[in-house]
Image (cartoon, rainbow, N blue to C red):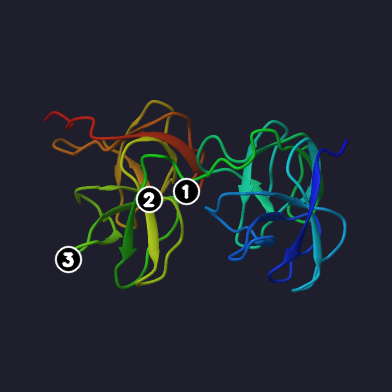
Amino acid sequence: MKGNILNFTAEEAVPAFRFAKVGTSDGNVKLATAGDTVLGVSTDINSDAGRPCDVQFDGIAKIELGGSVSFGDAVEPDSNGKAVKATATPGCAIALDSGVSGDFIRIKLDGIGVPTTPVNAMKYKAATGGVSKNTFVKLGSTAGEVTTAGAGDAVLGVAINDAAAGADVEVQPYGIASVVASASIAAGAKIKSAANGKAVTASTANDVVYAIALEAAAAANDVIKVQVGYAGVISG
């Protein structure tokens, strides 16, 4: 069931069934990538740069997946404009089917245009070595920079996007965020940063707690929801 569709000009190549965003000139659209404010979804025709590009901006649309999603998941664009499970509520659409990377599914676009970056996120520059999405970060040695948090470090927040050295990175200092686990974690566990910026259970006396696990991680590298924010110190 298609919704409203408007015709634009592709400022760059926009493949079919991808998230699109506004371009730099009036009437132009570009491929939406991670963290962008989404305008809508390209229809069933691949559009080369300078060619017409139809974009559906409400209703039920079809989109290509860039990763696994389940029915009812909030989704957002990946680096190629494909739909992936949103790392921050509310995302920009709702999956109406389950699927894996390369599948085409239906999504509900009503309410589209909401940025997927949390409203409380702050922008920094990534220090030497860069930072990874969904890991804890700390302040760097240079003003305005952040770097990956290590074990025992004072955590500033969670990186919302991957960023190479010198690139912009959005950091969520509090609220509900997604973080990569370094090992299995129980729901409700108190969380600190491991050596690689991933989440680990805080269980040793004097550990500083920077988050609470809102769901369990079965194994290392699972991505879980956590409530970010200083939550005390493990007593001795």
User: Tag on residue 182?
Assistant: none
Q: Which residue is mark 2?
A: 198
Is residue 111 or residue 234 the one in the foreground?
111
Marks 2 and 1, the one that precedes in the sequence = 2
Q: Amino acid at mark 3?
A: Ser
Closest to the camera, between mark 1 and mark 3, is: 3
At mark 2, the secondary structure is: loop
Q: Residue at x 73, y 33 (%)?
A: 71
Q: Residue at x 30, y 54 (%)?
A: 137
Q: Are marks 1 and 3 in contact (CB under 8 Å)?
A: no
> How far from the left and from the top, in percent, is residue 168?
39, 63
**Mark 2 neighbour density, 10 Å: few (under 14) some (14–19) many (20 or more):** many
Q: Are marks 2 and 1 in contact (CB under 8 Å)?
A: yes
Q: Where is the N terminus found, in terms of image quarters?
A: top right
Is residue 91 or residue 179 the one in the foreground?
91
Q: Which residue is mark 1?
A: 220
Q: Amino acid at mark 2?
A: Lys
Spatial CA span between label 1 and label 3 = 29 Å
Q: Are marks 3 and 2 in contact (CB under 8 Å)?
A: no
Marks 1 and 3, the one that precedes in the sequence = 3
> How far from the left and from the top, in percent, is residue 42?
78, 54
Q: Which residue is mark 3?
A: 141
Marks 3 and 2, the one that precedes in the sequence = 3
Closest to the camera, between mark 3 and mark 2, is: 3
Closest to the camera, between mark 2 and mark 1, is: 2
Q: Is 45 on the left-hand or right-hand side of 73?
A: right
Spatial CA span between label 3 and label 2 = 21 Å
